[in-house]
């Protein structure tokens, strides 16, 4: 039995590979093949487009995958989101030409085109998210009720409100306005590409990061579930490790109670006596954003501070797969 694991190509590829490698996986051949090798014989990797991964996982063609939350929402795939990997942060925004100074929201955009009697043309890779967001807008509902904006692709055209049209984009969406589109729904990281194309964001539809997703049926298979939770544990360790610092300090016997009392972050430190019986070694893991606040106390009460950024912090007590009803009944038989 192998767990089929889909990893993304494109802008998600490099940060995903970095996360996997930090988790202890050794991956080779990803630049030459769509089936790279990995140092876990129970995992079979496949490189796919992030747009495809939610559907492939939902349909059971892949057991687990890494993709963007935006594509999970866009496809409506019925998958289990196991973990926010907290990398590849992007925003899906509505953008229009910078020269349109009167238009600074989707509401004003819809109202302006309705007032002028012109159809509003939108270009995007996100047909469903765009349609849902439009229909949730107060101005759209007031003007067009529950009607669906018309979606236009090379293969089909559907929807009943031809006053608002959504055209499927196959990339370079920022280049569409003003000749081929009046507005775009597009993902941005810094907004530089919009700026270079004389566009401005007027509204944020959603924020997205890379996420680990799993097929729900695979999670019910005891053998596959265990391997999926191994993957989850290692990747969760990387995510948590980025936020923590591992500190080691030497403290005198008389200062030890004061140190433990004044540092609430040290809930379960490891305390070990040194060769000098009047001194102890204390080591623990703290939140990275607490370090500067704790430093004055450490400086006053301790000596020999050593700080490491941990590769991983594994929450073994927090990640326990739930048993299926069949397994619980089997346990009861004993």
Image (cartoon, rainbow, N blue to C red):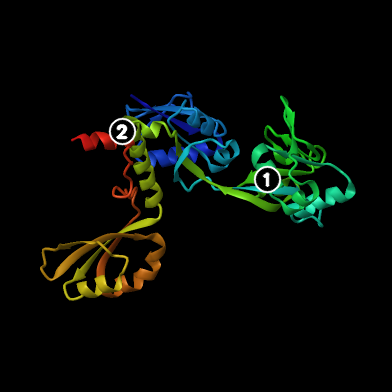
Residue 65, position in %: x, y? 46, 34
Quadrant (top left, top right, bottom left, bottom right) of the N terminus: top left
Q: Is residue 215 left or right of residue 286?
A: right
Residue 197, position in %: x, y? 74, 45
The image quadrant of residue 334 is top left
Disc 2, SS: helix
Badge 2: residue crowd in 10 Å (few <14, some 14–19, many ≥20): few
Residue 155, position in %: x, y? 71, 24
Is residue 99 among what the camera can see?
no
Q: Residue furthest right?
A: 116
Cα distance in 3D space between marks 1 and 2: 53 Å
Residue 142, position in %: x, y? 78, 52
Is residue 202 among what the camera can see?
yes
Relative to the observer, which residue lies in front, 15 or 137? Answer: 137
Residue at (71% x, 46% y) in the render: 135
The image quadrant of residue 76 is top right
Q: Nearer the viewer, mark 1 or mark 2?
A: 2
Residue 326: which numbered mark, if any?
2
Q: Is residue 281 left or right of residue 38?
A: left
User: Would you name the residue on which mark 1 appears?
Assistant: 193
Report the number of discs: 2
Disc 1, SS: helix
Residue at (76% x, 46% y) in the render: 145
Relative to the observer, which residue lies in front, 215 or 331? Answer: 331
Q: Is residue 149 left or right of residue 80?
A: right
Relative to the observer, which residue lies in front, 240 or 166? Answer: 166
Badge 1: residue crowd in 10 Å (few <14, some 14–19, many ≥20): some
């Amino acid at each position: 039995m192998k767990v089929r694991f889909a990893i993304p190509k494109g802008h998600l590829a490099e940060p995903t590979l970095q996360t996997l490698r930090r988790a202890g996986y050794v991956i080779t051949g990803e630049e030459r093949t769509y089936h790279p090798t990995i140092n876990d014989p129970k995992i079979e990797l496949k490189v796919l487009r992030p747009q495809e991964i939610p559907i492939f996982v939902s349909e059971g063609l892949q057991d687990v995958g890494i993709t963007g939350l935006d594509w999970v929402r866009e496809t409506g795939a019925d998958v289990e989101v196991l973990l926010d990997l907290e990398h590849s942060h992007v925003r899906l925004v509505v953008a229009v030409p910078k020269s349109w100074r009167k238009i600074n929201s989707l509401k004003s955009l819809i109202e302006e085109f309705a007032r002028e009697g012109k159809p509003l043309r939108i270009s995007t890779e996100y047909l469903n998210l765009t349609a849902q967001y439009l229909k949730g807008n107060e101005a759209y509902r007031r003007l067009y009720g529950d009607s669906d904006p018309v979606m236009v692709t090379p293969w089909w055209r559907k929807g009943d409100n031809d006053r608002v049209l959504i055209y499927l984009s196959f990339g370079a969406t920022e280049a569409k306005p003003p000749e081929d589109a009046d507005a775009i729904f597009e993902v941005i990281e810094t907004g530089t590409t919009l700026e270079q194309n004389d566009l401005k964001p007027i509204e944020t539809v959603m924020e997205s990061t890379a996420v680990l997703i799993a097929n729900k049926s695979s999670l019910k298979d005891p053998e596959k579930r265990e391997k999926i939770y191994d993957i989850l544990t290692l990747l969760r360790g990387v995510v948590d490790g980025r936020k923590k610092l591992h500190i080691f300090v030497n403290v005198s016997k008389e200062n030890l109670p004061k140190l433990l009392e004044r540092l609430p972050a040290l809930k379960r430190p490891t305390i070990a006596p040194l060769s000098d019986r009047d001194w102890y070694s204390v080591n623990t893991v703290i939140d990275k954003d607490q370090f500067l606040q704790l430093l004055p106390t450490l400086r006053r009460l301790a000596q020999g501070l050593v700080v490491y950024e941990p590769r991983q912090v594994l929450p073994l007590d927090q990640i326990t797969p739930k048993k299926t009803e069949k397994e619980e009944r089997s346990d009861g038989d004993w």
